[in-house]
Image: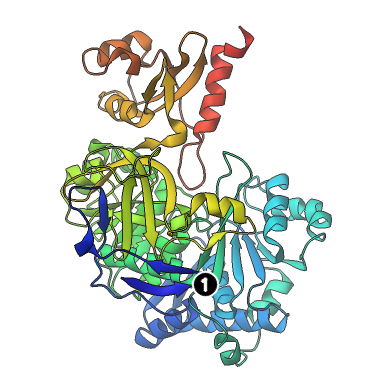
Amino acid sequence: MTTPTRNDRPIVISDPADLDPTLSHQVGRTDVDLLDETIGQCLARIVAEYPDHDAIIDFYGDVHLTYTEFYRKVQRLASGLHAAGYRKGDRIGIWAPNRWEWTLVQFATAEIGAILVCINPSYRHKELVYAMGQSGVKGLFSAGRFKDSNYRAMIDAAESQFSRHNYKETIFFGSERWDELANHAILDLNPVREQLHPDDPINIQYTSGTTGMAKGATLTHRNILNNGYLVGETLQYTDQDKVVIPVPFFHCFGMVMGNLGAITHGATTIIAGPVFNPQSVLEAVEHGKATSLFGVPTMFMAELDEIEHAKAKGKTYDLSSLRTGIMSGTACPTRTMRQVMDIMNINEITIAYGMTETSPVNHQTLVDDPIEKRVGTVGRPNPHIEVKIVDSETGETVKRGEQGEILIRGFLVMQGYWDMPGKTADAIDEDGWMHSGDLGTMDEEGYARITGRAKDMVIRGGENLYPREIEEFLMTHPDISDVQVVGVPDEKYGEELMAFIIMREDTEPLDQAAIREFCDGELTRHKIPKYVECVESFPMTLSGKVRKVELREHAVELLGIYQK
């Protein structure tokens, strides 16, 4: 079974009928058509179908645009960029928190075939210079400042280093240059559109770089447009849905699953604010009568806390319009899932799993999956996606229920890492399989369960220990809100386990003795953490993932291991 060719690597997936059902190998549904168009073509089609529907509501920026109004602004900015000399393949960066102009830039750059380089708003001088230089950014859209981030000052300090590469200018939102480009007369861009193809690269997303220099995952129109579309299909979106997106746009969660998931269905994107704030999110849901809400588990926990705090003050939020949404980034405790369904009315919430390199979703639960599947698994492959789990040493596909590395193939696999052919070859093999580095199992129904990261594995006295398994057990303790387990150096065993614990409100901190007592008889002794530290929060990426590297470094500092 072959789907359209992407540049030099055909996108081939196996015929489901040829697969051995006893092996951990599955292909998602193939009865759903993939979109064979560019992002610009898709937007034009949606505008023609739903001209007067709301496209974007930005409560923070006080902006409300129909599809016709939004499309006109896209055409003006795209015309301005083209008139300024930006062409297909040029890299245009964006460095700003969430705002409606972010989405405008996303679609305007796609309209002329420029490659949007997403720059993390939390980046500082060194990281900014690296991303700009590594991708060869020609023009940069940026906020002037936000809270303690003075973007203008950082850009002024770094511009001399930008100029060594392809850099031309920075356009600050709200500046005269922004107004000049955003209000440009609409040009005939048809000759430009005719040069574009769904398999052209359109987006560069930098990975976190926790294991080395950040890598720029290069994604095509076909990658991200279809990924967003199929996420929306799984959520059963129609043009009547309204989606609150509090996750950052610079990440695939926001710009693909959020923006593209909504717009491919003629639905409405709602921006609650520049960064996550539980009160702003709940107010956006209420005032916008949202049907869908995105977030990582900690966001939903914060929203549940805000609901309780507001209730104590005699205030309630009307969340009756909510139906569905996505929880992603890390495992969700069962009690949180039940509260989200019961208190927030999101009965059809789904779990999604993937990585930037798969643009980003490869697995997702269904809106009617039982709760045990939503908290215990990450779902099954979405349509036109092939997944297998292999033995990390032999490369052989493992039996159902056995652990191995998760491999993904299909339309969603990135084109490669920008200007890093060696790293690309390490990640994507000759048969087109993306090696995720995640460990997992597949059950008889095809649902996948993530058991950990290969790089997070702890080797204690020759035993391979997987922190995810231990974390999931500790999360069953009624006083624990969240937990992360890492390995720390040990003279006798090579490594030992340390648990960082966030306690629930109004509970006493747990020590190692309490944890040992709780685990006794449930976990083998070598899986019980030797060290326990209660903390208020974990170091997080803006996309909601825990920075385990920082936790390990902190553990070493706490224990003074290297000083002994």
Residue that mark 1 sits on: 7
Where is residue 411 drawn, in percent x and y?
40, 66
Q: Is residue 261 visible?
A: no
- The type of residue carrying mark 1 is Asn
Count of numbered tags: 1
Give the residue drawn at x 29%, y 60%. Answer: 382
Where is residue 283 drawn, in percent x and y?
37, 55
Classify 53 as above or below 342.
below
Comparing 49 with 221, the one in front is: 221
Give the residue drawn at x 43%, y 36%. Answer: 454
Classify 130 as above or below 398.
below
Viewport quadrant of the N terminus? bottom left
Viewport quadrant of the C terminus? top right
Comparing 337 with 176, the one in front is: 337
* Crowd class of label 1 (few under 14; some 14 to 19; many from 20; radius 10 Å): few
Give the residue drawn at x 61%, y 59%. Answer: 418
Q: Describe the colour scheme in one phrase.
A: rainbow
Classify 401 as above or below 80.
above
Q: Is residue 399 visible?
A: yes
Where is residue 406 drawn, in percent x and y?
36, 46
